[in-house]
Amino acid sequence: MPIPSELNPTPRILMGPGPSDVHPRVLRAMATPLIGHLDPQFLGIMDEVKSMLREVFRTQNDLTFAVSATGSAGMETCFVNLLEPGDEALVCVNGVFGNRMSDIVERCGAKLHRVDAEWGEPIDPAQVKKALEKCRPKVVAIVHAETSTGVLQPVEEIGQMAHEAGALFLLDTVTSLGGADVRVDDWGVDAVYSGTQKCLSAPPGLSPVSFSPAAVEAIQSRKSKVQSWYLDMTMVKNYWGGDRAYHHTAPITSVYALREALRLILEEGLEARFERHRRNHELLRDGLEELGFEFAVAPQYRLPMLNAVRLPDGVEDAPTRKRLLQEYNIEVGGGLGKFAGKLWRVGLMGHSCDENHVNCLLSALRRILR
Amino acid sequence: MPIPSELNPTPRILMGPGPSDVHPRVLRAMATPLIGHLDPQFLGIMDEVKSMLREVFRTQNDLTFAVSATGSAGMETCFVNLLEPGDEALVCVNGVFGNRMSDIVERCGAKLHRVDAEWGEPIDPAQVKKALEKCRPKVVAIVHAETSTGVLQPVEEIGQMAHEAGALFLLDTVTSLGGADVRVDDWGVDAVYSGTQKCLSAPPGLSPVSFSPAAVEAIQSRKSKVQSWYLDMTMVKNYWGGDRAYHHTAPITSVYALREALRLILEEGLEARFERHRRNHELLRDGLEELGFEFAVAPQYRLPMLNAVRLPDGVEDAPTRKRLLQEYNIEVGGGLGKFAGKLWRVGLMGHSCDENHVNCLLSALRRILR
């Protein structure tokens, strides 16, 4: 085989469900020569990342850091550490990622209870309440921002119900963190995970997580070993924590990138960032509706950073996305799961959440659809 | 908390057990703007990475790609996919990483059989033969290059025994791949994993793996689901394979880096690269022995890329390594596990395997120890 030529991907405008565009400062951070993962300077960098993640998660949780793999591994980390065979878990499902949670619960050997809602609708707290009367879950899990449907889930009430039922409250913030308010402590979240490639605008590769003292206690009182060695918090916490005991080799460059992405977020300020996401979402919404797109989600439950829209009559999904990519270098996402072929997912995430991006997409669509 | 200042780690000379130094071309590749993980251009990049990995592993295995996490996750991938609860596995243990394999086997609910050797010595094939008379393992696993002890393990004979016993042969090449010969097909290896941050000289974050047709068959005939969702080959193979079915979001930038690192390897040529590792190892060996260091491993089993040496009498471990780092910016590794505080692990891996590096280290040590 001839050796492939120099890396030369076409520059794209990333407006899909992730990865999002990355700020040039983050790219530059990734070109920084590596230091060792046990170098005192790298330990300092890990501490800075932990502190900044606590600010972004709005938490005081000591056990707050980034799992050395992508967001889905963060999901798995939360479940495999909290659940043991025979435990019960209640999972709220209204899209692909709630389904994925259910799958993982069963792989843990735990008994799964589900509360379902239609795709495109939020979970009804009354249904959760009813379900909690019939089971004794160790964990109640829900997705804050369903990337497959564009639904923003109100979670405070459900978190409270979970605690009243004696359960830990587990929250997926892969798509929301850094783009909409996530209040881990105020909302009583016991285990939370995210991904770097959405509104944090770092490349995919790490999964920020945080565990409350109650979750840490649950992990420490396990009777069995965590089924995953790589994701076992009883060891990983000593690597990211005070002991710095060798576990695996942290992805140095990805940590550099996350550190720079977090610096950018704190420089902008969380509130200003959320406001930017709302503003550009409204601009996009108005433009898309003018073109005949229809939002799949009711206004009060719409995610600003992930716009799920049904195509105007007569507009074909794949060929139109292909034209956007080939003629305009703009990527938008197709539907996932039962929404495949039925809608688009237009991302406005982090650095990609930009008025110029919105204008480019709307102008291109006007040309293509006219 | 004030926002941390600009990323500014001190440039280091990395001569520990990994990460190794990264070629400037790899750093530059990482500064390339991201494209989507389902972009046709990224699918092309994945194909190129798969092809180049096949050359480096010397295999025709179709299922050859990079797991989206570091080397230890590659280890876990191999075991959790091949083993089901109740299966038996025979693990050869002569260091930290054989121990880690044993731990993972037990977390899979499989019955563990061990063949042990002293740390610093290779596994004796006769012991493996004896063990195989007393158990019926589905998998026989061994480490090719024990990073904790510096031992290069001859594996062909043991692989043959595994097959004669009807078992799959699983090999850890985290430290050897790209620095010493690894012949997956010739040696009858059924499952193999490595890491990017050693002799491949890309940043940590991916774990190249390859599965033989027999291993794929074993995975496909499982009765139970793989316990890890993230590492489940029955799904991941459709993401890296023809279907491109969405599973997780690949770490785009890490794949860029691995692609460039593999290009550098193939440009140099595998044989030339191995010869470079041998040559610099000999130079380092002569210099270290002159300074009173003693190799922990007999000459015929020494790894060229990981030199495990006992310190000269009267030389203290931690303070000396600290001086090397602080005064010369040179990182060497300390001992691991039962070798902690007892020896150094001096890495000559990939781009770090350089005559100038060897000269810098030896000159610095002459100054410090005189």
Image: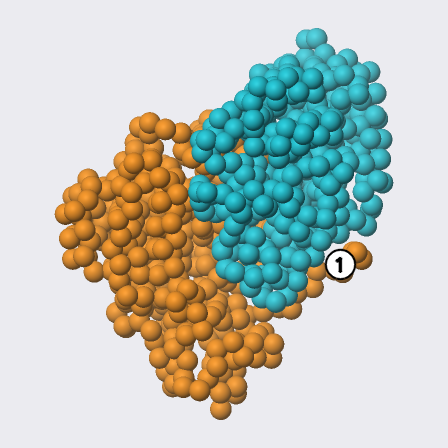
Chain colours: A cyan, B orange
Residue sitting at x 71%, y 53%:
A51
Q: In the visual, does A233 lie left or right of B280?
A: right
Does A39 appear above or below A28? below
- Image quadrant assignment for residue A118: top right
Relative to the observer, which residue lies in front, A175 or A212? A212
- Residue B344 in the image: x percent, y percent? 43, 73
Q: Which residue is mark 1?
A: B4
Q: Mark 1: give few (<14), some (14-19) or many (20+) Cα within 10 Å.
A: some
Q: Is residue B313 visible?
A: yes
Badge 1 marks a residue whose secondary structure is loop
Residue found at the very far top of the displayed protein: A313
Q: Which chain hosts label 1?
A: B
Q: Is residue A332 visible?
A: no
Residue sitting at x 67%, y 29%:
A164
Does A73 appear above or below A284? below
- Residue B193 in the image: x percent, y percent? 39, 48
Q: Amino acid at mark 1?
A: Pro
Relative to the observer, which residue lies in front, A337 or A40? A40
Q: In the visual, does B121 lie left or right of B308?
A: left
Q: In the visual, does A368 lie left or right of A225?
A: right
- Residue B87 in the image: x percent, y percent? 28, 37
Residue sitting at x 73%, y 27%:
A157
- Image quadrant assignment for residue A144: top right
- Residue A88 in the image: x percent, y percent? 52, 28
Residue sitting at x 80%, y 25%:
A284
Relative to the observer, which residue lies in front, B207 or A1? B207
Q: Quadrant of the N terminus of chain B?
A: bottom right
